[in-house]
Amino acid sequence: MRVAVFGASGYTGLELLRILLRHPGFEIAAVTSEQRAGQPVGDAFPALRGRLELAFEASAPERIAGRVDFAFTALPHAASAATVAVLRTAGVPVADLSADYRLRELGVYREWYGDHGAPELVGKAVYGLPELHREELRSAELVACPGCYPTGALLPLVPFLRAGLVERQGIAVDSKSGVSGAGRKLEAALLFGEIDANARAYNVAAHRHGPEIEQEATLAAGGEVRVTFVPQLIPTTRGIATSIYCRAPGGLSTADAHAVLTEAWGDEPFVRVLPPGEMPSLQAVRGSNFCDVAAVGDERNGTLVLLSALDNLVKGASGQAVQCANLMTGQPEETALLEPAALP
Amino acid sequence: MRVAVFGASGYTGLELLRILLRHPGFEIAAVTSEQRAGQPVGDAFPALRGRLELAFEASAPERIAGRVDFAFTALPHAASAATVAVLRTAGVPVADLSADYRLRELGVYREWYGDHGAPELVGKAVYGLPELHREELRSAELVACPGCYPTGALLPLVPFLRAGLVERQGIAVDSKSGVSGAGRKLEAALLFGEIDANARAYNVAAHRHGPEIEQEATLAAGGEVRVTFVPQLIPTTRGIATSIYCRAPGGLSTADAHAVLTEAWGDEPFVRVLPPGEMPSLQAVRGSNFCDVAAVGDERNGTLVLLSALDNLVKGASGQAVQCANLMTGQPEETALLEPAALP
Amino acid sequence: MRVAVFGASGYTGLELLRILLRHPGFEIAAVTSEQRAGQPVGDAFPALRGRLELAFEASAPERIAGRVDFAFTALPHAASAATVAVLRTAGVPVADLSADYRLRELGVYREWYGDHGAPELVGKAVYGLPELHREELRSAELVACPGCYPTGALLPLVPFLRAGLVERQGIAVDSKSGVSGAGRKLEAALLFGEIDANARAYNVAAHRHGPEIEQEATLAAGGEVRVTFVPQLIPTTRGIATSIYCRAPGGLSTADAHAVLTEAWGDEPFVRVLPPGEMPSLQAVRGSNFCDVAAVGDERNGTLVLLSALDNLVKGASGQAVQCANLMTGQPEETALLEPAALP
Amino acid sequence: MRVAVFGASGYTGLELLRILLRHPGFEIAAVTSEQRAGQPVGDAFPALRGRLELAFEASAPERIAGRVDFAFTALPHAASAATVAVLRTAGVPVADLSADYRLRELGVYREWYGDHGAPELVGKAVYGLPELHREELRSAELVACPGCYPTGALLPLVPFLRAGLVERQGIAVDSKSGVSGAGRKLEAALLFGEIDANARAYNVAAHRHGPEIEQEATLAAGGEVRVTFVPQLIPTTRGIATSIYCRAPGGLSTADAHAVLTEAWGDEPFVRVLPPGEMPSLQAVRGSNFCDVAAVGDERNGTLVLLSALDNLVKGASGQAVQCANLMTGQPEETALLEPAALP
């Protein structure tokens, strides 16, 4: 199956290439980059020298649609919406890594992202978290791959919301993220000298992934969920470590909470429920498509602590997109995604 | 005034030396280290070559007591208790950086640390957080310097507890710490290869600093406070960034919360209340004795987010000890402590 | 083909597992670790949870020899020698990642490493640098995989020595290495607090890899080569960036030097000769089996600068061992080794 | 004495502020920044909040000249030249941290930097390396502070050139630098994601500091010196670790080389000659004005290895500028500069 990667020179685009290069069912047929159009991939990114004999081309979805069977769009939001619309009109199935089709209500999208490039498609995409929407994904033609933070928040949290074991309000999600989550943006705040040996919260209770977490959590809970989402930058390149604080009114022990997670995700190929007492770490998931989850019940304080770790560029973006694409195209879901984290 | 530093070759001991070298009122007269007894300080630590012409000596508090007017003890807990007792018997005022005199009840100490080396002194020390106990410190002869995590938790939290603006239960304290907080311990988990590019929670709701936070928070609140304390290791050497999640039943806006912090700490020399919208960062405090604090009210979710940043070896340990010592000896509180963070 | 990994819980052992898990021709049948004998691999290393359903066992080469068709030995030097001898006696082909069989003369080995555990085998191994010894490797039964530093030094240097274009004396090799090269040793000098934000040379002109570089360089040059080898630790986990300074008496331009490298390595699958003006970087090779090389001629100073970058755990150890094993077992040399570096 | 810092919001400007804040003889009277004119220093840089109650102003050297007794110019090259000329015309003594007055020949300047903003002053400045030009500095009114790389290269090298113990050609200088040396430039190559876990050489034998090193080395040697200068970026913020490879035809032992360094620098306050066998490290100098140096003689290969470590923003820039200013204004040379490196 021939695939195109739109926006292939960004961090998630490059990660898609890395995964697709080992995928037996997909052949990379087109890679786009406005900035680098015309440049061979290996000249622009020496890491790929000798591995991918293609040149970047300018994005032209009408033209490229005719050459491929599937498309990944890893473009900035807004830019993505329109490209996706052209591809869908041409009948190409799309896994979109941007934020453009994640929010189901146009009004919420506009509040957080501004104008939408193809409002008629809003609400038509399947939310690409296979652990929540696997069956829908098998027949989906347009998938909105989740944000990196929502993936790390929803996987540990949803089982407890579904079971009604925690209060739906007053939830706090504290996520520590490597800087690659911001992409290769030319901002002074992302220079090495500003991130190294530093750590700080940003957009506290005001980050775009907050409403995305609430949307999916509310769907899962069957009632409105309120989350205070606090993202933090830590001095590393990849990975998100999330801690979630919920109120468990009846009390919930670590053992009980572990049982809930195991019941929910025990058979999932990419969610690993850690044994009680073991905590998720970025090192164990870096470069891999795994999301490790754990729970600790602090009964004396009526609080349940949920923890997760994932690689924001893999399970938080490109790996998850390939997982969705595997489902959409009828291939084994794990294809090309079982590579474990490198140690150390 | 001649001072001794017991345990001068550990991370907090070395930081004491760095601060005392610029202190006009204290002269370093004795430095102890069991491992390095007999070795000139500059041979052991090239950074101090040419700056401190002393050799480490074995700890002998009886003997050293006669040569000094003041002592800092930066020994491991348990070891510290007994040394402090000898120094106090000899009439030497002591700022103790260990955990041995922080907990006011022997039973709680034993539960978390084991046997105590001088139980008769437990409860006799002043808790060395000048922002809470300044007046007592002026006449104290034994000061228990707070743990690094409690300092970062109490400074933003106490004003709201005192004012009764947040619930006293269900508080979550999420602290991201550099590894120097663990000291120079020979543990595989602290090797560069295990910390670099990694992040993970540890001792979730089961860390020794939890009861210390609760003890002082309870005192400040005038009623029992319950905290779920979750420490996390991030890949940096110095600094603790803390986020605290509390329930503010009546709602509390960011502006109101900022006013509470300003009212409490506006005149403090080492607590900087950041303007609304600005977040504490490790970079702004690293190497300095400042603790930056901020607050964000998430009224729609009934949640107050408090944030702080400090250098665990300075305001979280050695800087704070010198701040206490300045008070104990009648010197200006800021002496030798105004050095700002280096940028970048 | 069933394979054993001896010393599978060290850094090079774990990297072997990571590569072998994606190898279609090798099945991991036994993994040994003295420290972790009996423990399931996934319990000890959460990154491998769900990927490798084996437990570590104690090293027992006699017994394990009967269960496998090939062995990798990733044991400390000296320990490796004896294990290898047992495996060879049992007829098992071995790729040895230790230093025990790299040096061709027992006297030199003893000078740098001490007693040898199987002196009768010294000089019997093929040096496992496929770019220099490919044909011998195809029929080898015992391969001594090169050290990480020698790999990075020899690949750029040998073509110029063979062509007689540089002086054989007065060569300086300056190698900057990540700390994983030292393994997971419990040394204070390898703690995060000592490596982070630090850099320093060590064992200047006195490192064990110096005689190894000289041995192979001398063989290639057909006359005695003298190298001043200066290893340096830099604050990263993986990778070695090497700069070599040689005297090119007749002058050698960058273009000419590039031609020499291209002539030598243009067809190699894992040595990438960078275009003139482009410099090797750790990022482009990290996690991969590639070694990138480049040359700059400084004709006005009669100096040729050679540069290389590789991942010390892959092309500098475990990847190279698998490359050798592929040759030894008649499989395509690139099998399981084409994974590119992750970006960023 | 009232001082101005031109270009105070860059990395070297900020480091000047940090040092001047603890300087008893200088009062910061004006700080300029085009980008941040009008903004209070503490708002722009929270680390300085509460420490410096000044606002940045636009650079207006004519006007500011009347308000100060001394000026530091930390502006980009070319911009600096003209500002310095105005200040000098107004009679203000200047320590210039830019490259504009370092090169003694206008032609060489133009080759490497382009047009010069005040060519009439070229050759009139004293080169601000106190260890080489102390007496001239005492009466200088215009000082060109050395580049960070030249400082680290010249201090270990000059004693051997002066003594005629090494060949003047074929010298290689391999310098590993933290990224703050590049300033706070908005370049993709300086983003955290590109520097973290990376290392690479750049401008090999083609960096602007090469001719600066050769100029001063030639002056010291009394004959033309040729250097192949190879700068390298390593993943840290501050510090330069330099290794120099020279030919010592008669042979030079480590002990002899150590004696040469001790003879040259034994009485210097900021150059520390390490004992034989001890290697300079960034950690021992970070944040301090010390430059640590060492030498290893590799007699069997006719090679002398010289090593140094310094903080590029302190001894490599702002600390050295204050050291010069102390000399120029008749104050003790060490004033405000004895702060040791923080450990860890």
Image: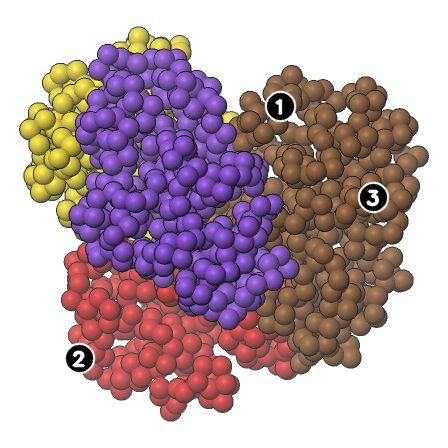
Chain colours: A brown, B red, C purple, D yellow
Q: Is residue C295 visible?
A: yes
The residue tagged 3 is A330
Amino acid type shown at disc 3: Gly
Instruction: State the CA–CA distance, disc 2 to disc 3.
Output: 80 Å
Mark 1 surroundings within 10 Å by alpha-carbon count, few (fewer than 14), some (14 through 19), many (20 or more): few
Q: Nearer the viewer, residue D33 or A238?
A: A238
| Residue D329 percent location from the top left of the image | 22, 33
To the question of a shared chain for discs 2 and 3, the answer is: no
| Residue A315 percent location from the top left of the image | 69, 49
Between label 2 and label 1, give the one nearer the viewer: 1
Mark 3: which secondary structure? loop
Q: Is residue C64 left or right of residue B303?
A: left
Q: Is residue C118 left or right of residue B190?
A: left
Quarter of the figure with the C terminus of chain B: top left
Amino acid type shown at disc 2: Arg
Amino acid type shown at disc 1: Glu
Q: Residue at x 21, y 22 (%)?
A: C167
To the question of a shared chain for discs 2 and 1, the answer is: no
Task: Look at the picture and state if A230 lies above or below B156.
Answer: above
Q: Nearer the viewer, residue A182 or D322?
A: A182
| Residue B251 percent location from the top left of the image | 77, 64
The residue tagged 2 is B63
The residue tagged 1 is A53
Instruction: State the CA–CA distance, disc 1 to disc 3.
Output: 27 Å
- Give the chain letter at badge 2: B
Quarter of the figure with the N terminus of chain B: bottom left
Q: Nearer the viewer, residue D280 or B148?
A: D280
